[in-house]
Amino acid sequence: MVQGTFTQARKMGRDEGEAAARVRDVLTVLRVRGIIVSDADRERILAEEDPARLGRWLERAILATSVADVMDEPSRAA
């Protein structure tokens, strides 16, 4: 029981660390590319905890010309 709790806590810590690193990466790429990030957008990026979404944002930030290019999710309507 204790081992399971420890393993879960370790995984949560790793996930939080991964998300924090991706947040820093997204903000760094935007800064280096000279893209202005509003306070509201910065707060949204800082609050994001989904590593997959942050990974998509990071990939988009590499070629983006605005924060909207990074954070706007494409419509899933078919």
Image: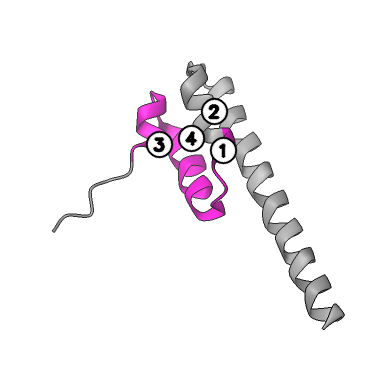
Residue 21: assigned label: none
- Residue 26: quarter of image: top right
Indicate the amino acid at tag 4.
Ile
Mark 4, residue position: 62
**Residue 13, placed above or below residue 39:** below
- Which residue type carries mark 3? Met
| Residue drawn where x is 74% and y is 70% of the image | 8
What is the CA distance from the residue labelled 1 to the residue labelled 4?
20 Å
Any mark on residue 43, and which?
2
What is the CA distance from the residue labelled 2 to the residue labelled 1? 6 Å
Helix, strand or loop under label 4: helix
Mark 2 neighbour class, 10 Å CA radius: few under 14, some 14 to 19, many 20 or more = few
**Image location (x, y in percent) of residue 59:** 48, 43
Mark 2 in CB contact with mark 3 (< 8 angstroms): no
Q: Label 1 amino acid? A: Ala
- Is mark 3 in CB contact (under 8 Å) with mark 4? no
Residue bearing mark 3 = 71
Tell whether label 1 touches label 2 (CB within 8 Å). yes
User: Is tag 1's residue or tag 4's residue first in the polypeptide sequence?
Assistant: 1
Regarding mark 3 in the picture, which secondary structure is present there? helix
Where are the magenta residues, as a range?
Answer: 46-72
Chief SS of the magenta region:
helix
* Label 2 or label 4, whichever comes before in sequence order: 2
- Numbered tag placed on residue 47 in the rendering: 1
